[in-house]
Amino acid sequence: MNKKYTYIWVSLIILIFGIIVIPRIVDRMKSGTVVENDRMNVATTTKELSYITLNGKKRKVPTFELLNQDSLLINDKDYLGKVYVVEFFFTSCPSICPVMTKNLVSLQNHFQDEDDFGIASFSITPQYDTPKVLKAYAEKYGINNTDWHLMTGDRDTIYDLANSGFNIFAAETPDAPGGFEHSGLFALVDKKGYLRSRLDNFGNPIVYYRGAISEEMGENSQGEEQEISILREDIKKLLEE
């Protein structure tokens, strides 16, 4: 066949493809039926809570024993029988920590009548965040849940707890705001000490909840459900188990 006619046929096929297929893709994008491949997108169609697993085994909270804001030793066993949220923060953080703390305070206030709800906050600047400093921070933000422990202790122990125990990133980074960097994620733990989360649209656990997204932001431009509202729903489910 003459090359000239071959080019014409190829061009015609491409044109037909564009006329038929592309409008359908655009319609799907407008209607939201094109799914984003984002494991941290928690706008899921399922509300089922899953166990977080490693090598086929359900992951439990790693052991720890640290001082809280009242200079009391607190360990992982003190949280057994409670549903709680875990975070890593520091009191002098100039960026995401204030948002994270306010989100946790909103959870504290929402579940104020629940005896089985708690929060575990681990400082990544323990050399500065003494029990006295943590106590002042708690008073500043209205932290009054007796099962919300702001903890400090050995620096290496806390960083190992963050990066290896919970796999929630934390590091000393001179260029980061305040000199330290962390992910701003919340982990959810059930009454038996197992890490839990809801599933994404692909049937995989989202693992963590983004704690640095303010509720005041509402839904984002893609219609993603509010992170803290979702976490609140999941806490309620675990409290009812």
Image: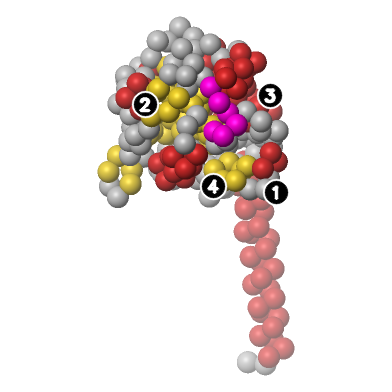
In the rendered image, the vertical position of residue 135 relative to residue 194, given as above or below: above
The local crowd at label 1, few if under 14, some if 14 to 19, many if 20 or more residues have their Cα within 10 Å, is few
The residue that mark 2 highlights is 75
Cα separation between marks 1 and 2: 33 Å
Give the mark nearest the N terminus, 3 or 1.
1
Nearest the eye: 80 or 206: 80
Residue at 63% across / 42% down in the picture? 180
Residue 125: % across, % down: 57, 35
The residue that mark 1 highlights is 175
Which residue type does callout 4 highlight?
A: Asp
Looking at the rendered image, the disc whose residue lies closer to the viewer, 2 or 4, is 2
Which residue type does callout 3 highlight?
A: Glu
Cα separation between marks 2 and 4: 34 Å
The local crowd at label 4, few if under 14, some if 14 to 19, many if 20 or more residues have their Cα within 10 Å, is few
The residue that mark 4 highlights is 38
Which residue type does callout 1 highlight?
A: Asp
Give the mark nearest the N terminus, 1 or 2.
2
Q: Is residue 66 left or right of residue 28?
A: left
In the rendered image, the vertical position of residue 95 relative to residue 73, given as above or below: below
